[in-house]
Image: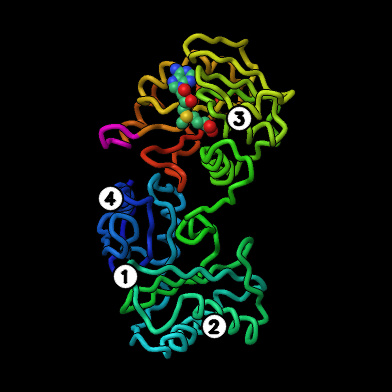
Amino acid sequence: MNERADSTAESRFVVTSNRGFAAYAQDELRALTQGTKFDELIPAETYLMRIPLGRDEAIRTIAGKEPIFLRHMHPIDATVSLARTIDDIRLICAAAEKLHETANCDKIAIQIRKAEGFTSAFEPSELREAIAELWLEKFRAETVVKDAERIISVFLTSDCAYIGISAPGDNLSDWPGGAVRFRKEEGQVSRAKFKLLEAEYAFGLDFSKVAKALDIGSAPGGWTSLLLDRGAEVTAVDPAELHPDLLRHPKLTYLKRNAGEVAFRSDTYDLLVCDMSWSPKQMVKLILPLLDSLRPGGIAIITLKLMHGKPFQTVKDSVRAMQPTMQLRKAKQLFHNRDELTVYLQKIN
Ligand SMILES: C[S@@+](CC[C@H](N)C(=O)[O-])C[C@H]1O[C@@H](n2cnc3c(N)ncnc32)[C@H](O)[C@@H]1O
């Protein structure tokens, strides 16, 4: 859908995608608002976007139809030219201070990112400390990492600082640049666990409400272990071995089989997850008969491998194959997705 652009308005944002996927995000953003333009800040990942809409209208338009490949954005409310001296810190703080009325709150986060090859007379950490001190002393606002009311974002190139102040929701992610960093736990079965953890957060889900879950393509068991941790009863299906630490879990049923060889009673599961690294066509073929085991209103979280560089067609074809039983709630390339994206579907009541 093309928004009709107000010919006088223009706003600027720093926009970020997973490395190598920015061109897709740009296609999505241009399809939302004709005339949107991009200048590179970090190759194939971070761009300065000029959009022919006012700042708030641009945020509403983008949030209303969130692009699959746009991981993070923040507005540019002020730009400071840098002289590459220590005085740059004072200039950036002065520009940020002028924006204070949009960050009049008790808790702020300060997120500083830099372009590759950024050189300066100061470290980004020194700038963060200076802004934190300013907000504490002048405005009595505490600097936090999570659950901030406003985020002060600064993107540094060697010549310029782009500064924006926004509500966390306006940035699509409250992590700097949308780079979600979970702490690896001792004994964690696989890094794949982070993908499902991020999906739970990004899609606003709460897996502790899931009573019964089906995990297709579950080995070595990162996703299964997360669902067991959340208290669900889990049926894990994979011809490969699950991690031995999981096998003793009283709420686990492990079927060491191919997805094409299993069948379940109708309306049994609240959640179906699938992380098979297969072509989406093959994966959908295997998943289709299993969707009957999902109860009405039940949820499916599925990773879709991106084949032959046609991501939008892949999503369209895969979702169409699962309709009308399943409705697409959201498709998103998560930070923990590599050459894939994640879809969140819900079974029609
Ligand atoms: C990327 S791994 C899954 C990782 C898992 N989500 C985790 O958190 O540890 C993909 C798994 O899909 C399984 N797989 C591939 N084809 C399958 C099939 N037809 N039926 C069941 N599992 C399959 C593979 O054996 C492999 O263990």
Q: Identify the secondary structure beneath mark 4.
A: helix
Q: Position of residue 310 (x, y in %)?
A: 27, 35
Disc 3 residue: CB within 8 Å of ligand 1: yes
Residue 275 visible in the picture: no
Q: Identify the secondary structure beneath mark 2.
A: helix
Q: In the shown orientation, is residue 13 left or right of residue 148?
A: left
- Front residue (pair 76, 144): 144
Q: In the shown orientation, is residue 310 left or right of residue 261?
A: left
Disc 1 residue: CB within 8 Å of ligand 1: no
- Front residue (pair 235, 345): 235
Q: CA distance from mark 2 to mark 1?
A: 23 Å
Sequence order check: which comes first, mark 3 or mark 2? 2
State which mark lies toward you, 1 or 4.
1
In the rendered image, the quadrant that contains the N terminus is: top left
Sequence order check: which comes first, mark 2 or mark 1? 1
Q: Residue furthest right?
A: 250
Residue 224 got which mark? 3
Q: Mark 4 = which residue?
A: 23
Q: Position of residue 238 (x, y in %)?
A: 52, 19
Sequence order check: which comes first, mark 3 or mark 4? 4
Q: CA distance from mark 1 to mark 3?
A: 41 Å
Residue 117 got which mark? 1
Magenta range is: 306-311
What residue type is disc 1 on?
Gly
What residue type is disc 2 on?
Ala
Asked if marks 2 and 1 touch (Cβ < 8 Å), the reply is no
Q: Mark 2 = which residue?
A: 130
